[in-house]
Image: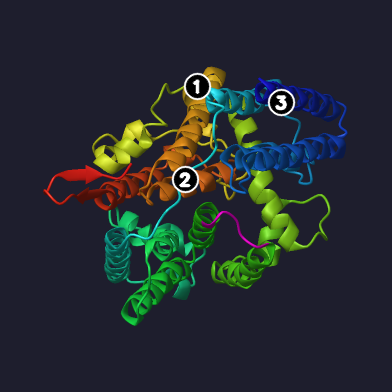
Amino acid sequence: MRRRNDIIMEYGTYMLVYFMSYIASLARFYYLSGILLMLEALYLYVHWVRDARNLAELRGLFTLAWVGGQGLACLKLSRLQKDWDYRTWACFFLVYIGFGIGYEWGQKYDSDEKKELGKNPVTAQRLLVCITGLAIVSVVCFLFEALRLKFIPLFSDKPHAYSYFHVSGIHYFTISCILIPAITVLYSKVREEIGKKETILLVLANVTAVAIPVLCVSRFQLLFAVGFAMVTYIMVYQGVRLRTLAGIAAALIPLYVILTVFRHHDIAYLNGIFEMKYEKMPIFITQPYIYVANNFENFNCMVEQLAKHTYGVRMLFPFFALTGLKFVFPKLTASVVYLTKPELTTLTMFYDAYYDFGMIGVFLFAALVGAAAKWVMQLVKKSENPVVYLFYGQLAIYLGLAFFTTWFSNPTTWFWLILTGMMYLYVGYDRDKRGNVQRNE
C-alpha cells in the first residue's frame, strides 16, 4: 500500500508541475516552462531508478526522454517554434498518464528478485551462431546493395546519401548487424571461457557492427548499436561504472562529428535550417536541441493542420511494408506529413497514434506501450533465456528516444523484434536426456 501511495504522489506531483509549466508557457515565460518540466523529469527518473535499483528502468528512461524532451522544446530557442495548441498540451499529458496506467496495470508488489544468467555452454554456442550468422548476412547484403546501387554513402558526395542506399527488403538484413554487440554481452556472460578462435570471431563480428553504420553514414544506427549493448550490459551485470560510460561517450563524439561531416552538413547549412534565435550558439548544442525539440513542434503542426484521421492506416505501415502490400496499394501508405520545415522530418513516437485516432489513440497507444514495458520487465525477472535481454534493450532504446521517431510504425523496428523472437526460440529450446524438447523460460 505504501508503494502505491508513493506512485500516486509522484504522478500527482507531475500533474501539478505540468499545469504550472502550461500556465508559464501561456504567459510566454518559456524558460520557466521548460525548466519546470526538465527538473520534474530528472526528479522522476532518479525516483524510479532508485526504486528499481536499475539505471535502465524502462519507466525512468521514458520519463527522462518524454517529459525532459518536452521541457527542452518548451524553451523555444528556435524561430521555428511557436506556442502550442491546447490539444497538443493535452496529448503530451495523456501520453505520460496513459503510459503510467499501462505500466501499473496488474502490477504485483512482491519480490523484485530476478533469475541470474549462469554459465551454459549450449546457450553460449547458440548465441555465437546468432552472432556469426548476423555478421555474415549483414556483410553479404551490404555488398549486394553497394554493387546494385553502385555507391557507398561514406564515399559519396551526395547530401543525404544514406537515404538512397536502400534495396527494398534487403536493407533490413544489412543493418541487423547492430544487434551483434548486445548479443556479444550475453555470450560473454554465459560462456565459461572464450578461446582464441571465438575471440577473433567476436572481434570481426563487432567490427562489422560498427563498420556498416559508418559506411552507411548512419549516426543513429551507430548510437543504437552502442546504446543497445550498454543497456544489455547494465541489465546483465547489474550496473556500469560512470567512468566507463564517460569513456564510451568520449569515443563516440568524434565518430558522430566525422559522420556529420561525411553527410555533407556544414555548420552554415545546419544553422540555416535550425533558425536559432541566438545565432552564435555552438552547433554541438543547437543540433541536439533541434533533434529533440522540433519533433514536438512537428506534432503540434499536425494537430493544428490535420483535416481527418486515418483510422489505423499509418500505424499499419509496417504490415504493408513487410508484406509488400505497399507496392500493390501505394495509396494506402500515401499521406501528408506535417512538418515545420521539409528538412526536419523526425517525429515523436505518438505522431501516428494521433494521426490515426486523435487523443483517444494517443492515450490508448501510450497505455499499451506502458503495459508492454511492464511485461518485458517481468519477463526479464522470470526467464532464464538470455535473449529476453535483447527485447528489453530494444524497448529501452525506443522509450529512451520516445521524442525521436514513430518507432512502432516503423517496419525496421518490427523486423528486429521478429528477428529477436526467432533467436529467442532458437536459443531457448533444449533437449533432455530422453530427447524431449524443453524450453528455458
Q: What is the spatial separation of the Cα atoms under label 2 and label 1, in whole angstroms?
A: 19 Å
Q: Which residue is mark 3?
A: 6
- Sequence-first disc among 3 and 2: 3
Residue at figure coordinates x 22%, y 50% from the top left: 430
Q: Main secondary structure of the magenta part?
A: loop
Q: Position of residue 54 (x, y in %)?
A: 61, 46
As drawn, which residue projects farthest toward the bottom? 196
- Sequence-first disc among 3 and 1: 3
2 vs 1, front mark: 1
As drawn, which residue projects farthest toward the left? 434
Q: Is residue 401 visible?
A: no
Answer left or right for 384 relative to 362. left
Q: Which residue is mark 1?
A: 106
In terms of image quadrants, where is residue 118?
Answer: bottom left
Q: Position of residue 339 (x, y in %)?
A: 59, 39
Query: Quick one: SS at disc 1?
Result: loop
Answer left or right for 392 relative to 255. left
